[in-house]
Amino acid sequence: MRIAALDIGGTSIKSGIWNGQELAEVREQDTGAKKGAAHVVNQVLEILESYGPFDGVGISTAGQVDSREGYIRYANENIPGYTGTRLKDITVSRFGVPVAVENDVNSAALGEAVWGAGRTHDDFLCLTYGTGVGGAIIIGKKIYSGSMFSAGEFGGMVVHPESCREGHPFCGCYEKYASATALVEEAIKYDRSLTNGRQIFARFHEPEVHAIVDRWIDEVVHGLVTIIHIFNPSCVILGGGVMEQPYILEQVRGRTADRIMDSFRNVELKTAALGNRAGLMGASRLAMEQMKKT
């Protein structure tokens, strides 16, 4: 078995070969997202060509994905013109092998379900904290996609309605306050040199920086309390580089436990186990399933 897997993000495209046991030949290159969808598609095809013969293709990608038809239902302007791109049709036409296409957070959650932090759970939720807040729902080791392939948009939960303005559908929403981007934006207000998470945590000993992080953790917890009370999950997996900070996970666990009902405290909050390979591994799994169908 030789499956080519790709994970298309706004910054980079990761790729590798799943041989049935592990990922091999793993690479990463710039997406060149601002050059637009046609450039990104050409990048994808060139990467696949470079891997030589393969039996199937699994693609994890940013954007809302119709996983049945394999096209991008909606994408923001991080990749201009990406909405409507028919990745599956394009790839099948070029290579003539089974192809699976799925949203990146869904792919990562499936990878965690099979090989990572979710492998001991049939059902769990997954949230990633990065540029925005991504979400996925796993039920019976399968992705729950909703009626239009967009379930799990936890970043769209309204947590601060007082900041909403008419005609702005994402104002007051969770990702505006709980994403890693939101943390950096608050840090920059204090010191313009704090432009990323590494710089923030390098100065975590400073009381002002510590307080900024603590306020951000409260925002993370606001959303977690809501979704735990809605879904009553046995597990919530937290992804994104910022969640690898031990202080963050400890505080998120403690503050969440303080704010949920006693009958919900069976929930486990875990960090993702597969790192930046989760999407590739989930895409590989989906490609295997597609190969069985065809």
Image: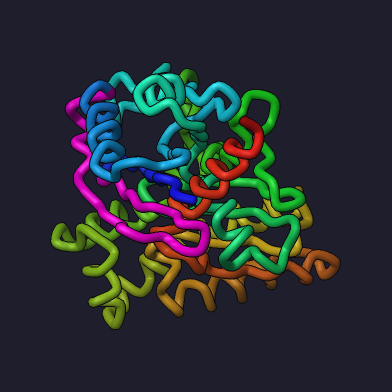
* Residue located farthest toward the left when viewing the structure as drawn: 193
Depth check, front residue: 106 or 218: 106
Residue at 29%, 73% (x, y): give it.
201
Image position of 13 with respect to 248: above or below: above
Which quadrant of the structure image shows residue 277?
Answer: bottom left
Residue 10, visible in the rendered structure: yes
Residue 72, visible in the rendered structure: no
Image location (x, y in percent) of residue 220: 52, 58
Residue at 45%, 79% (x, y): give it.
246
Q: Which residues are magenta?
A: 12-37
Image position of 120 with respect to 61: above or below: below
Image location (x, y in percent) of residue 240: 42, 59
Residue at 58%, 38% (x, y): give it.
291
Describe the colour scheme in one phrase. Answer: rainbow
Image position of 86 with respect to 122: above or below: above
Depth check, front residue: 197 or 214: 197
* Residue located farthest toward the bottom when viewing the structure as drawn: 205
116 left or right, relative to 60: right
* Quadrant of the drawing holding the C terminus: top right
Image location (x, y in percent) of residue 216: 44, 61
Q: Is residue 287 magenta?
A: no
Q: Is residue 15 magenta?
A: yes
Which quadrant of the structure image shows residue 255?
Answer: bottom right
